[in-house]
Image: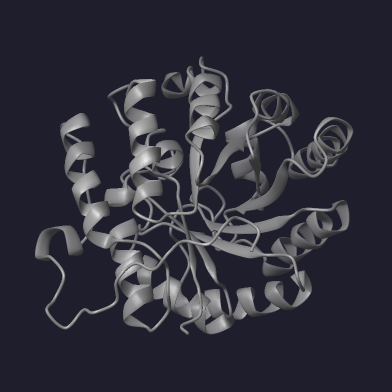
Amino acid sequence: MAERIQIREVGPRDGLQLVATILTATQKLEWCRRARDAGIEEVEVTSFVPPSVIAQFADAAEVARGAVALGGFVASALVPNLKGAHRAIDAGIQKVNYVLSASEAHNMANVRRTTQQSLDDFRAIIDYRDSVAKGRVHIAGGIATSFGCAISGSVDESRVLNIAAQYLEMGADELIVADTVGYGNPAQVRRLMSVILKEAGTVPVACHFHDTFGLGLANVAAALEAGVRAFDSSIGGLGGCPFAPGASGNIDTEDTVYLVAALGFETGIDIEALVALRRDIERWLPGERFAGAVAKAGLPKTFTNRAAPAREYGE
């Protein structure tokens, strides 16, 4: 049997954080439900940030509860601090994806604190989880700007590795290594991810790539070569970082699934169902820029990989 790759749909969070149109909770939950029905096993359904910062997520608790009630997939949420983690866990979210930036300048701009202060917050989040929901909520440690920063430029790989080591020491259930502004290249990805995977041991490691300079899918291929088996993506390539003006968004979910399948891996995801969902999202978000080749060209006649039954979370 083909080796399994997990694709996490982050469109309802990362894909929506910069769009002009505020979707309803009903639309966001339809996005989650149809992604689940297409075979996606985890959806990052919202972000617990203050509504004054991103109005799109004023309904975070409602969406989180609704997504958990849907069942059949892991409902995760992004949080930038301890307060956000409290809200997410209290709303019943199944997995908290915490994020800080390896770039000190980016972390200050994004969450107004030093990277070390954010790491201290992560330890407090683990302690809170262990006190109220141990075994029920997984905590992932995300490292933004791991491959470069639109504010400060290069990011030392040793700094990324040090943050990863601290996450692991504090008990992270997963590491998420993010190319937040799309500066990474395949050689860099292959080199850094090989080391991180070795250090992580049995702890799962995912990559989060943006397609700013057209290297998103090339970086997926490089990460696969290094041994990464989990990736974030957004339907239609929606999303982006507010500190990288003009940048394109995340790697496109439809194209990512196609690439992984073309390379001989299994995802359990129905690409045609994703394209059908994308068409409705395009109607929900008029004027937004959508990326991706599969939705435009369709699947080639040589493509034979079809969705397989999805795993249960934790298998």
**Picture coordinates of residue 286, whole percent (x, y):** 16, 31
**Picture coordinates of residue 198, whole percent (x, y):** 74, 78
On screen, residue 109 versus residue 3, left or right, reads right
Q: Residue at x 31, y 49 (%)?
A: 235
**Picture coordinates of residue 228, whole percent (x, y):** 57, 73
Query: Looking at the image, can residue 270 be seen?
Result: yes
Q: Residue at x 69, y 74 (%)?
A: 197
Q: Residue at x 64, y 39 (%)?
A: 94
Q: State the colouring used for the structure image.
A: one colour
**Up-down: is 107 above or below 225?**
above
What is the quadrant of residue 81 in the picture?
A: top right
**Picture coordinates of residue 154, whole percent (x, y):** 57, 62
Tag count in the figure? 0
**Up-down: is 258 above or below 312?**
below
Q: In which quadrant of the rendered image does the C terminus lie?
A: bottom right
Query: Looking at the image, can residue 214 be seen?
Result: no
Q: Residue at x 38, y 39 (%)?
A: 33
Nearest the viewer among 214 and 142 is: 142
